[in-house]
Image (cartoon, coloured by chain):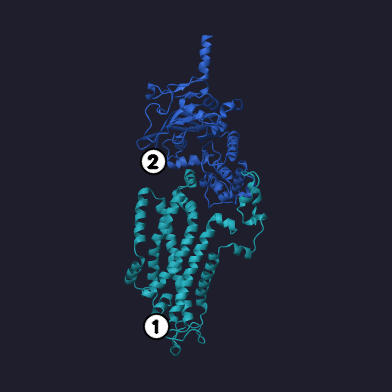
Chain colours: A cyan, B blue
Amino acid sequence: MSDDLHPLGSATVDPDLGALTDIDPAKRARPGIGRKLRGLPVPLIIGAALVGSFIFIALLSYLWTPHDPLKLVVPDRLQPPGSPGYPFGTDKFGRDVLSQLMVGARNSLYVSLLSTSVAIVVGALLGLLTAGAGPRWRNVFSRLIDVGVALPGILIALVLATSTGPGNQAAIIAIIFWFIPIVARVTIGPARQILALDFVEAAYAYGRSKWYVLIHHVMPNIAPLLTVLGSVMFAAAILIEAALAFLGVGAQPPTASWGRLLQESQPLLEAAPTLMFFPGVAIVLTVLGFNLLGDGLRTILDPQQATRTGIL
Amino acid sequence: MILEINDLKVTIGPHTIVEIEHLSLSAGTRLGIVGESGSGKTMTATSLVGLQPNEAVVEGSIRFAGRELVGLSHRRLAEIRGREVGVIFQDPAKALNPMMRIGRQVAEAIRLHMDLSSGEVRARVLDLLGQVHLPDAQALLRRYPHQLSGGQQQRVLIAIAIACDPKLLIADEPTTALDVTVQNGILTLLRELSVSRNMSLLFVSHDLGVIQAISELVAVVYGGHLVEFGPTAQVIGHPRHRYTQALVSANPGIADDEHLGDVVGRRLDVIRGSVPPLGKFPSGCRFRGRCTSELDICAQPPEVSQTGGGHSFKCWNPIEGVDQARGAVDATG
């Protein structure tokens, strides 16, 4: 059990000097992989499994799908799930739903990954700069960011789509602009907290520049936060991508997207309700997976908790 | 003189926070700055090396190792600070970056100011950790600050502060956040380092006992004014200024074994009132209003009185000194 203790918890010697003697990691038994997994929070494991399968399916779709997702097989249209050769059934043109879902995962991954990573990087830099700026500029930037947060994102997306034309590109740009102010807003507070600590003052005192301090001292301290935020935003991006596709401003036919699958199934709600079921479940599971992953990451990325569970 | 202050004045807006006519420190000596919270002791120490808050303005003259520091650019000051002046902060938990391993944090200061290969830096880090008596330095390099106790963290900070062999170490209440037993270890270490490296130490504390344990000289600060200065034993043993006396009699710990009886069971004296807020200090002697031996003349700014042995104070109505009393006896006899 001593592995689970805080390293200093088992110190019995002089509290100031002797405590280091019994925390040599080499002397501690290395936990096996099973033990390691057991130490992880449950949401993290479930989330990672869901996200892992999502990414696997999306990548697999490049290599293999049961059928050509775009091939119209009119005699086989509107097959119920479980029909021979079509485990999830077919749509009104006789396209295989499973194949379309797999390709749709790819589209979700592409749009969400690109938009979330750009938004996190740009938003975090903006937040760091705002936190590090002098009081006047900080106020100006903060208020501008507040305005950005307050703007209804879906509206921007619709405006963008009408001006640049619908498609994945419009969705990506819309999500980026939607997320940047949110990331910046979330970054500013913790970054300012870190900037108020003595080690930052010490770094300045030793002659480090503001930029160096922001990147080397503040950034690592808010990185766990950004990782968690990234995971949660990824989930939101998947939802938004689907929503935009559903509204007709995201992915355009023939690109398969979960949102478009939902939209196409809508008129057939009574005739073929399962057409709505599968993309819906796919969205729910993926979003749930990313949210659980973010939750789990938050637990373990705290360095104090991480050592307790033996992950680092 | 490693450090010489003349007519130092630190102001924030209309308020004068610190006003010190003269204070000097020779190489290798340990000076304690003592005073209540809000008396300006930290401000005095930080303004010496340009670490005062941005809105504070420093005027006068601070000569450090032959160079004038007042009016130097931020960049030049930072260079001097990193290389020749070490600074230790009050709360070790806040002064270490929680996301950075100890080894890298110690190496940071060395890399910035010394041109060494990474192997040499590593060797130096290990050597420094040894000098502050941290055992198993090798393993320590890879630890994060939270895995260390408060005393160990403070030792790491001392290692960082002395990394570039400074001539002066400024310690702002370095033991206040620590347990009393650990406190002693840190004080011993600081004294030892000061002696072995001939490094001056400027030690800020509100705790007379701690000051007594570490410093040879003591400067008593009240309302930003230096009210009494001299060898520690003399100032604390025979205070002349009324404020110093009030501080001493408000401290339960100062008594040798002989006088223990006087301390145990004694009702502790308190200084009446509290330190006035910024800008509300009275004119003349700043201790006016809280002092029990106030005279009318105290409304005038007090002059500096010198007594033997480098002891000086600024009080219109000082406590009679031992020398003076003895002198009086000599004159009559």
User: Is B198 placed left or right of A169 in the picture?
Assistant: right
Q: How many numbered marks appear?
A: 2
Asked whether residue B64 appears in the rendered view, the answer is yes
Percent across and percent down for residue A68 are: 48, 83
User: Is B12 placed left or right of B198 in the picture?
Assistant: left
Q: Secondary structure at mark 2?
A: loop
For the point 54% across and 34% down, the residue is: B201
For the point 46% across and 79% down, the residue is: A100
Q: Residues within 10 Å of mark 2 (few under 14, many from 20)?
A: few
Percent across and percent down for residue B204 are: 50, 35
Q: Label for residue A268? A: 1
Camera-side mark, 2 or 1: 1
B108 vs B225: above or below: below
Q: Chain of mark 2?
A: B
User: Is B249 placed left or right of B257 in the picture?
Assistant: left
Q: Label for residue B194? A: none
Percent across and percent down for residue A226 are: 47, 59
Asked where in the image residue A270 lies, by quadrant, the reply is: bottom left
For the point 57% across and 62% down, the residue is: A40
Front-most of residues B96 and B273: B273
Is the C terminus of chain B in the top left, top right, bottom left or bottom right quadrant? top right
Percent across and percent down for residue A135 are: 37, 48
Identify the residue under disc 2.
Answer: B55
Asked where in the image residue B226 lies, by quadrant, the reply is: top left
Q: Secondary structure at mark 1?
A: helix
Front-most of residues A183 and B39: B39
User: Is B157 placed left or right of A126 in the picture?
Assistant: right
